[in-house]
Image (spheres, rainbow, N blue to C red):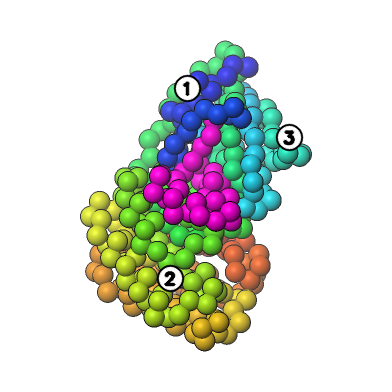
Amino acid sequence: MKTLLPDVKQYLFGVFSAYESHIGLELSRMNSGLAEIYGNRKSTIVRAECTTNIRLRFKTDSQNVGLSLRFGDPARLIYATDISVKGFDTISVSPLDPADGMDVTVRLPGSGMRDVTINLPHLVKTWLKDLRIDDNASIGPAEPLGGKLMFIGDSIFQGMTASSPSRTLAAIAANLLQRDVVNVAVGGATMDAAPVECAKEYGADIALVNFGVNDYAHGITIDEFRKRTVACAKALASNSAWKPIAVSPVPYPNDSGRNAAGHTFAEFRKVFTDVMSSHSAITVLDGFEILPNDNECYIDGCHPNDMGSLLYGNAIAKAIKLLG
């Protein structure tokens, strides 16, 4: 097989930077501003460095594709990589021992030139060491996509805890809409205007924001949450280059009733909705209309499972289609 690594950058999507290192091609979805915001604590660094919704997209007539990956610190112990050929079922592969990385060769379904998408692991830092196709095969750019979705938020938007990258809500929505996607959500993030400001550099035409669960769980006062939400809404509405969408927090089955500051989850949701709705430019989606308050859709009473992610991704795609 022949390596594609020298030219692989042209096939990368959802990535802000990719540079050579002694381990392999290091991939980052964060620009310098976002890296600074999320670079102050070990837990957020690990989550920010995950290759969430970073993909390889190309056309090839190769019968096989070879992939070599190396892994860093995980946000969750999920190392799956999803390989999809348009019109066929997704093939999911995982390493036997993540410490050794993953070196696999997968036979692709179909024949002739076809669109291939490789979704890299979404909850672990990943280096691309090599990408290979058959010696006599050709490769070229995949069909262009119609615009770019930007996801800004916390662990739920990052895809915790879908079982593989193509099952994340962002990937599901992007696939249904046939759009590119950049995901700068970071587990543990709280309401903040700064990531929204930084995200304007990416050139997305639709920006989705979802914060609030961590603010509530961390015991932030409702007045402080309102102050932060006002600033975030202003940043979201101020960019005429994108259509802004704010998704209020989805149900929280493990809710204890009140946070450490004595406030209810319903109070946080109401502040989110009221503030975001005060801007005519922002479309507000109700999280309680996206997911039921039922543990069947959650893996741990807070984060959606595969069923919840599917419902969430479908709801986002439907809402964006209605926007026109």
Q: Can you say whether 184 is above or below 54 in the image?
A: below
- Residue 284 location in percent, x, y? 35, 69
Q: Are marks 2 and 3 in contact (CB under 8 Å)?
A: no
Q: Please give the name of the residue rendered at 55% of the width and 74% of the height, measured from the top-left corner.
A: 217
Disc 3 designates what residue? Answer: 100
- Splitting the image into 4 quarters, where does residue 106 fall? top right
Q: CA distance from mark 2 to mark 3?
A: 40 Å
**Mark 2 surroundings within 10 Å by alpha-carbon count, few (fewer than 14), some (14 through 19), many (20 or more):** many
Compare marks 2 and 1 and give the one earlier in the sequence: 1
Residue at x 46%, y 28% (from the top left corner):
9
Residue bounds of the magenta highlight: 25-54
Q: Amino acid at mark 2?
A: Ser
**Residue corresponding to mark 1:** 7
**Amino acid type at mark 1:** Asp
Q: Which residue is located at x 63 percent, y 42 percent?
A: 72
Q: Is residue 186 visible?
A: yes
Magenta-colored stretch includes residue 48: yes
Q: Which residue is mark 2?
A: 248
